[in-house]
Image (cartoon, rainbow, N blue to C red):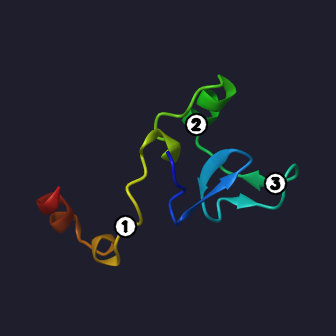
Amino acid sequence: MDTVPAAATLWEGLLLLEGHIKGEAPDATGWICSECRRSLEADMMPKFALANNMWIGPIPHELTVLTLPEELLIS
């Protein structure tokens, strides 16, 4: 990934969404899923990492308020 998406930040070499890390290194805290933790512990990139071309951009407001039938119709 050549550029950092607008809603993300580089933190200690990791591409993370803004606001997902609290505090400053080395005492910072945050949350990651268990699958991502296992990948990072194995020194591998998580399957759904933003840096693994999984960044699709911010979701437009119009799509966040869809009902279930509307979501199914456009999927």
Amino acid type, label 2: Cys
Where disc 3 sits, the SS reads loop
Q: Determine the residue located farthest toward the left in the rendered image.
A: 73
Taking 74 as reference, is 42 left or right? Answer: right
Quadrant location of residue 22? bottom right
**Which numbered disc flags the more N-terminal residue, 1 or 3?**
3
Amino acid type, label 3: Ala
Which residue is the site of mark 1? 59
Q: Are marks 1 and 3 in contact (CB under 8 Å)?
A: no
Q: In 3D space, how far apart are the residues under numbered discs 1 and 2 (Cα atoms)?
A: 22 Å
Where disc 2 sits, the SS reads helix
Taking 16 as reference, is 68 left or right? Answer: left
Residue 33 x/y as whole percent: 58, 42
The residue closer to the viewer here, 8 or 31, is 8
Q: Is residue 15 above or below residue 40?
A: below
Q: Are marks 3 and 2 in contact (CB under 8 Å)?
A: no
Q: Which mark is residue 28?
A: 3
Q: Determine the residue located farthest toward the top in the rendered image.
A: 42
**Which numbered disc flags the more N-terminal residue, 1 or 2?**
2
Residue 39 x/y as whole percent: 59, 28
Q: Which mark is residue 36?
A: 2
Q: Residue at x 84, y 59 (%)?
A: 24
Q: In 3D space, how far apart are the residues under numbered discs 3 and 2 (Cα atoms)?
A: 18 Å
Q: In 3D space, how far apart are the residues under numbered discs 1 and 3 (Cα atoms)?
A: 27 Å
Please state the total of marks drawn on the protein image.
3
Q: Residue at x 65, y 65 (%)?
A: 19
Quadrant location of residue 36? top right
Mark 1 Cα-neighbour bin, 10 Å: few <14, some 14–19, many ≥20: few
Where disc 1 sits, the SS reads loop
Taking 50 as reference, is 24 left or right? Answer: right
Amino acid type, label 1: Ile
Q: Residue at x 69, y 44 (%)?
A: 13
